[in-house]
Image: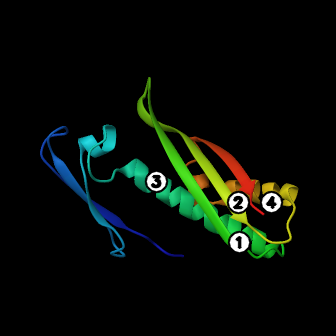
Amino acid sequence: MTNRSAEAVWEGTLKEGKGNLKLSSGAFDGAYSFTSRFEEGTGTNPEELIAAAEAGCFTMALGGALERAGFPVTRLHTDAKVSLTKEDAGLTISKIELVTEGHVPNIDDATFQEKALEAKANCIISRALSSAEIVLTATLVK
């Protein structure tokens, strides 16, 4: 199968330092810092990248599940929100909320919901993040 990679560089102390995250594909190369991760500073953070990975993986898995069931997708849109919380063991990703809307011709809501749950269960990133609660809200848009 394939291997994917990324790199991180960090310089300085935890709170005053700065870092850079770079994908090997070249699709992203950006700054991160203490403030971009734990406050509202400029730049990205690992949790935001996890949210992007989960949204992308789930949406692609849902599109595939719908297509295999005979319902080609017109458009899917998913927002993912990653919750970072403090627990006894330290900071952890405790919850991921997926909110997806699907424009899918000729499908009923029950089938759309079934395929959305199937995609959540089978998405590679969801399986990798199974220690977090993953909550799904799926809406079929006509």
Mark 1 sits on what residue? 64
Q: Is the residue 26 above or below the residue 85 in the image? A: below
Mark 4 sits on what residue? 112
Mark 2 sits on what residue? 119
Q: Which residue type carries mark 1?
A: Gly
Q: Is the residue 5 above or below the residue 19 in the image? A: below
Q: Secondary structure at mark 4?
A: helix
Q: CA distance from mark 2 to mark 1?
A: 8 Å
Q: Are discs 2 and 1 less than 8 Å apart at CB?
A: yes
Q: Residue at x 60, y 53 (%)?
A: 126
Q: Is the residue 93 above or below the residue 119 in the image? A: above
Q: Give the residue at the far top of this rendering.
A: 88
Q: Secondary structure at mark 1?
A: helix
Q: Which mark is residue 50?
A: 3
Q: Position of residue 4 (x, y in %)?
A: 43, 70
Q: Give the residue at the far left of this rendering.
A: 12
Q: Are discs 1 and 3 less than 8 Å apart at CB?
A: no
Q: Which residue type carries mark 4?
A: Phe
Q: Secondary structure at mark 2?
A: helix
Q: CA distance from mark 3 to mark 2?
A: 17 Å
Label 2: how many Cα within 10 Å (few below 14, some 14–19, many 20+): many
